[in-house]
Amino acid sequence: MTNPVQPATPIAELPDPLLPSARKAADTHAQKYHHEGAKCRGSIALIDERARLRGVAAVKLGRAISLEREVETRPAQLEKLAEVMRQEKAQWQSLAVAELPDGHGGVDLDVQTGVHGRNAHGGDVIKYDAHGIHNTHMDGFAHIGADGTWHGGIPVEDSQHDEDTMVAWAKHGIATRGVLLDIPRVRGTEWVTADQPVTAAELDAAVELAGVTLEPGDALLIYQGRDKFEAAGHRYTPGAVLQPRPGIDGSGATWIAAHEPGVVLWDFHDARNNPGARLEVHELIWAIGLCLVDNSLLGPAAEQLRAADTFVGQLIAAPTAIHRSTGVLINPLLLF
């Protein structure tokens, strides 16, 4: 159990934990969607019958592709990852990182097997960090908060007894039209770089390339080329390193809020190219209740959609209904 830290300085005198753009998006969202006596469920509430039917209509070939990165638990492969992290430790420490994450999501799998004559059985117990920069996961409300609350004014302390965002989202059913926003194709490059984050103008260009009109409740699949970036030997910067990295900038975050997606799936995260290296898009979790699926594997999907001459499909993302969860590992599916 984690107890909230009470600051010695009055809250009103502390630095604002959110960017001004996030505050503005929060005000706009609250005026439009927050109603007395009703709990806001954030962006997922925008996925209605029309959004689901758009998704169904986008399926033409009957094909399916997983958007999940593999969850690595094999000892030999984990040791290879650990060695890479050890080699990079000096570099990250030079950036004043006090405690370095392992970068693979903190998954511990205890597999228990038994053989009894000709019979065998197996079981396992798994413990994982629901966040990080490797495993594909869905962020819940209780991942990013401000002023002692999660989105919609839910007190942070509710996470200790009855916060239910993931349960509500699981019951709602996250199935909608998915629209691929292919940023490398817009740029004519293989991946996004830290010195040139994704802007609102490029997101507009990706929509124009897709030839669709976005609707509230759509799923945005924002492909930035992370698979090719990593295949070329580059390592994506973990969250503890407060420096710019490939991703979406503040103008892109404002663009996302304005287009009201039901869910956003992306491979690279926030560009963090603002003063203080703030999380431009992740702050929208608090501001508008944005459902984010981090570390999505979008490269193979982008290639298959290109080959099929389409940018749309049906996105299905079914989280596990875990009470009090801040996020869950997930296997999103795209049907097209």
Image (cartoon, grey):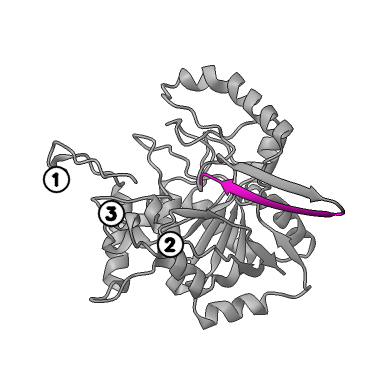
Asked if one can make out residue 247 in the rendered structure from this viewpoint, the answer is yes
Mark 1: few, some, or many residues within 10 Å (few <14, many ≥20)? few
Asked if one can make out residue 189 in the rendered structure from this viewpoint, the answer is no
Report helix, strand or loop for mark 1. Answer: helix
Pointer 2 residue: 323
Residue 148 is a magenta residue: no
Pointer 1 residue: 12
Q: Quadrant of residue 313?
A: bottom right
Residue that appears at 67% across and 75% down: 58
Identify residue type, mark 2.
His
Q: Magenta residues, as a range?
A: 118-129
Are the residues at dot 1 and dot 3 in contact (C-beta closer than 8 Å)? no
Q: How far apart are marks 1 and 3 (CA)?
A: 20 Å
Q: Position of residue 141 (x, y in %)?
A: 39, 58
Q: Residue furthest front?
A: 117
Residue that appears at 24% across and 76% down: 37
173 over 238 or under it: above or below:
below
Mark 2: few, some, or many residues within 10 Å (few <14, many ≥20)? some
Report helix, strand or loop for mark 2. Answer: loop
